[in-house]
Image (tube, helix red, strand yellow):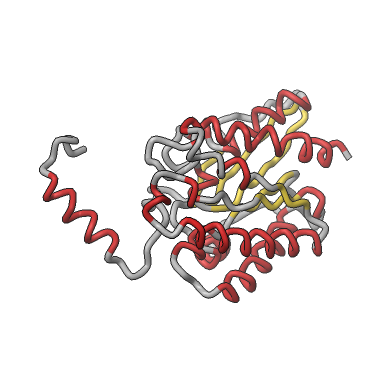
Amino acid sequence: MRNLTTAPALLLFILVITLGCSKRSLSPQADYETEESPNKVNDNSQNLNYLALGDSYTIGTSVELEDNYPSQLSSAIENQLSAKVDYKIVAKAGWRTDELLKALDNEKIDNHQDLVTLLIGVNNQYQGEPFSKYRREFKELLKSAIQYADGHSNNVFVISIPDWGYTPYGQGWDSEKITEQINEYNAFAEETALENGVKFINITDITREGLTNENLVADDGLHPSKEAYRLFVDRMLPIIVSSLKN
């Protein structure tokens, strides 16, 4: 790791090279594509399989693995239902919808998932991809998510895209345009989810407190913090637990 006192000129050079890429990612690429739950299933308790699909917001870029929302959600479900949750994350920082689709083609995933969450699209928006491409590919991803849940759409949940315009990093961009586009993406995701019998959980408003509550933004000035993910889970938990009980 380079010393933080590296000459400003070198840092500026790296920044220019990074921003000059034709296909930018909202966050650095992670070194992994999947993460398995560190929890080992106890044969003497109820076991639930949870699949989390997404991008940097799912793997929890800039927070510890146990602090991302799938991990916090799994622990919360275990406490609520006295069950063991074995979770798998298929996500990577910078992924668009097409990249998640490609990754799923290469994954061997059991189609008997008790819970599937899907949160994707911010990198489509950030990179200026055609909205029509997102519309088409999001429908494919949701179809796959339902298949992974053994066709039970009530066990699939679409999570809204956070608004990175309300972060310190986002202040260097046209934050009003970011918000307008994020709203468009989320509106389509919600409409598509409801059409397929899938619940849509809106957490975007939480992230729009990022400029007034610095505790909601990670140290990188861009991604949600552990505290923000906790608030996501507080919103998600009663909705998800209710479906799991039925």
Q: Is residue 171 left or right of residue 34?
A: left
Residue at 83 percent of width and 37 percent of height: 242
Residue at 57 percent of width and 61 percent of height: 180
Name, please, the residue furthest toward the right.
Answer: 246
User: In the picture, residue 115 is in which quadrant?
Assistant: top right
Q: Position of residue 33 (x, y in %)?
A: 47, 51
User: In the picture, residue 25 is in which quadrant?
Assistant: bottom left
Q: Nearer the viewer, residue 154 or 13?
A: 13
Residue at 78 percent of width and 27 percent of height: 81
Q: Is residue 10 left or right of residue 99?
A: left
Residue at 46 percent of width and 33 percent of height: 214
Q: Nearer the viewer, residue 149 or 202?
A: 202
Quick check: can you spot residue 208?
yes
Q: Quadrant of the N terminus?
A: top left
Quick check: can you spot residue 147?
no
Q: Quadrant of the C terminus?
A: top right
Q: Position of residue 90 (x, y in %)?
A: 55, 51
Q: Is residue 63 above or below residue 22?
A: above
Q: Is residue 245 left or right of residue 21?
A: right
Q: Is residue 237 left or right of residue 167?
A: right
User: In the picture, residue 133 is in which quadrant?
Assistant: bottom right
Q: Position of residue 118 (x, y in %)?
A: 64, 53
Q: Is residue 148 above or below residue 208?
A: below
